[in-house]
Image (cartoon, rainbow, N blue to C red):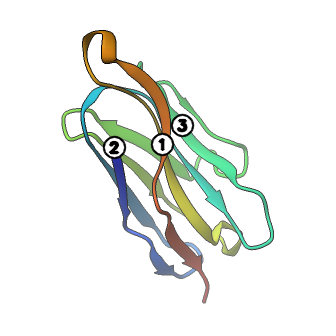
């Protein structure tokens, strides 16, 4: 059974930094596309950052230049470094993982979500 456990959220002042981590556990064959999404109250969930198996990254304009996604495949952990945070970055942040599990003919590819971690940017 695959689990994604996030950590690192909290309260930070505007202009500050936070780092999120997401540890993936289970019978993992390969980590494919990993990423972070966020959902603010009353808004739809939106992509914040993704990183592919070749380490190619993708960011929306709202966070480009401020957020950095990275992955440590040995530790099965994806990170999100957030700098120059703004009040509009306040949201619940979710880890997302496109993972291949199992072995041989039992191998399968699915998308998983973490439970979310709150990030609040406020003075």
Q: Which mark is residue 2?
A: 2
85 lies above or below 29: below
- Foreground tag (3 vs 1): 1
Dot 1 falls on a residue whose secondary structure is: strand
Q: Quadrant of the C terminus?
A: bottom right
Earlier in the chain: of badge 1 and badge 2, it is 2
3 lies above or below 50: below
Earlier in the chain: of badge 3 and badge 2, it is 2
Q: CA distance from mark 1 to mark 2?
A: 8 Å
Asked which quadrant contains residue 102, the reply is top left
Task: Name the residue nearer the viewer: 60 or 76.
Answer: 76
Asked which quadrant contains residue 58, the reply is top right
Dot 2 falls on a residue whose secondary structure is: loop
Dot 3 falls on a residue whose secondary structure is: strand
Q: Residue furthest front?
A: 106
| Residue shown at the point (63%, 45%) measured from the top left | 64
Q: Return the x and y of residue 1 as percentages of the image width and height.
A: 31, 43
Q: Which residue is mark 3?
A: 50
């Amino acid at each position: 059974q695959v689990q994604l456990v996030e950590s690192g959220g909290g309260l930070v002042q505007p202009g500050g930094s936070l780092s999120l981590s997401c540890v993936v556990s289970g019978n993992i064959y390969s980590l494919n596309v990993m990423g972070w999404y966020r959902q603010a109250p009353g808004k739809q969930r939106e992509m914040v950052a993704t990183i592919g198996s070749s380490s190619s990254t993708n960011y929306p304009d709202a966070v480009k230049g401020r957020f950095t996604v990275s992955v440590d495949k040995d530790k099965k952990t994806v990170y999100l470094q957030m700098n120059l945070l703004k009040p509009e970055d306040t949201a619940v942040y979710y880890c997302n993982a496109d993972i291949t599990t199992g072995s041989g003919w039992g191998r399968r590819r699915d998308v998983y979500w973490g439970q979310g971690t709150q990030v609040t940017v406020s003075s």
